[in-house]
Amino acid sequence: MGVLLIGSGGREHALVYAFSRSQAAGDIYCTPGNGGIAELATCVDLDVTDHRSVIGFCENNNVELVVVGPELPLVDGLVDSLEAKGIKAFGPTKAAAQLEGSKAFTKQLCSKYNIPTADYEVFDEAQGAQNYLNDCSYPIVIKADGLAAGKGVVIADDQAQAQQAVQDCFDGRFGEAGTSIVIEECLVGEEASFFAICDGEYAMELPTAQDHKCAYDGDIGPNTGGMGAYSPAPIMTDEMCQRTMSEIIMPTLRGMKADGMPFKGVLFAGLMITSKGPELIEYNVRFGDPECQVLMSRLRSDLLPVMLASSNGGLDRLVNEFDDRPAVTVVMASNGYPGAYESGSEIKGLEEAAGDADIMIFHAGTKIEDGRVLASGGRVLNITALGETVLQARDKAYAAIEKIDWPQGFYRKDIGWRAVAREQETI
Ligand code: AMP
Ligand code: GLY
């Protein structure tokens, strides 16, 4: 089957890696792709906001399945446009993508179907929100309703900070995304990422993961897209996974279907494990990045039939298989990220670093020029390793990084610290 993948990050390189190992794969295309993806797929330059050009490409190149990596084209309705032309797509429709595209939508769904989440109020004008801040307890969480590239959430320790955050939103800091806001209770606990591939009715559970959002060691510094991840997340015991499925994922699927927006694609629940159990922080309607990198490095079964069944139905007849060993991925980013950074520096030593079968290097912001690998983005590489333990996987990833010669990059040295601390307690 011909496949077109949309995206350019480490998540997409990991997906292409899975497709390249699929029995079902024919030609694999990716737009726009990156330096690593170009080794496994044909990279093409399409304007994904122009749905007709994507449809035309699929028709001319026998593409049978389009897999959408990032959220923007989903929220923009690309899947609807493709399906209207009979082209299968992995991902939700525009209506179902509201689970990520509007935080207020998701909170209202949670209320309607009794899904555990933080108590909240939605406001679409500043005065009501500011009045509400007079009587709430702190810390409190202020969120722009729409897509804000992960920057639309402020945890305010006191009323002054909260007032500022509300003001920033309604002053247009997040554009359209901030014309409405959610103010919610601050949940206390440990976070985990939970994934299920869905066909509108059935949910296939995938392994869990945990990511590291802060830029620097010790979970300090500015928020990023994610500086590393590992899978599985030890906090997600079998009981917690079962509860997440029965209390969060399945009621969501049933509710979305009942409301006329059946959810297909991958449902990624950002969870807080509180003293009461799993609570939903937010939904994403795509794989996490860098969580996808650790999931794909553990995947042993064929992903493409599962993705096709997510679109066609019949997912309940398929199984998935993952390596029991944990995986760790460490992100190497350009110095300065998530602020300003320079592009164009050369990265050397990647072949030596990837010399072991348990090491996978997924590219994010790279490009190849005259056979040289150059940095071309904020997050640049994902050094991913499997090991018997998280500690061993992490040591392998860091040993591989030692072989990479790229002075213009940096990485966190403590990825997986929670899981490693737990492992050491049990020794
Ligand atoms: P979100 O974009 O909704 O995932 O929020 C980004 C991050 O903010 C989450 O990963 C959490 O670390 C934090 N966060 C969001 N909502 C809450 C909440 N209600 N309580 C505590 N932390 C939160
Ligand atoms: N790593 C978190 C995300 O992809 O949203």
Image (cartoon, rainbow, N blue to C red):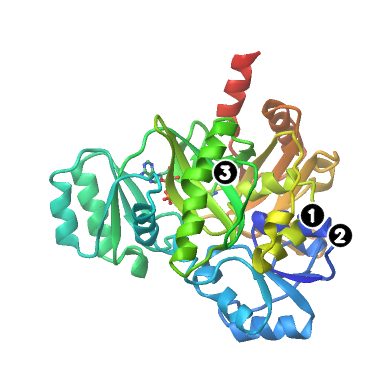
Please state which of residues 264 and 79 is positioned toward the viewer in this rendering: 264
Question: Label 2 amino acid?
Answer: Gln
Question: Label 1 amino acid?
Answer: Asp
Q: Nearer the viewer, mark 2 or mark 3?
A: 2
Please say if the residues under marks 2 and 1 sit with CB atoms less than 8 Å apart: yes
Residue at 56 percent across and 67 percent down: it is 92
Residue at 74 percent across and 54 percent down: it is 318
Q: Specify few, some or many for label 1: CA neighbours under 10 Å numbering under 14, 14-19, or 20 or more.
A: many
x and y percent of residue 198 in the render? 60, 58
Q: Name the residue beneath numbered marker 3.
A: 227
Secondary structure type for disc 3 = loop
Residue at 42 percent across and 60 percent down: it is 148
Q: How many marks?
A: 3
User: Is 27 above or below relative to 294?
Assistant: below
Question: Label 3 amino acid?
Answer: Met
Q: Earlier in the sequence, mark 2 or mark 3?
A: 2
Cα separation between marks 2 and 3: 32 Å
Cα separation between marks 2 and 1: 7 Å
x and y percent of residue 186 in the render? 32, 40
> Is residue 402 visible from the viewing direction of this image?
no
x and y percent of residue 167 in the render? 22, 58
User: Is 48 above or below relative to 333?
Assistant: below
Q: Name the residue beneath numbered marker 2.
A: 23
Q: Nearer the viewer, mark 1 or mark 3?
A: 1
Cα separation between marks 1 and 3: 28 Å
Q: Name the residue beneath numbered marker 1.
A: 302
Left or right of residue 239, residue 31 in this image: right
Q: Quadrant of residue 330?
A: top right
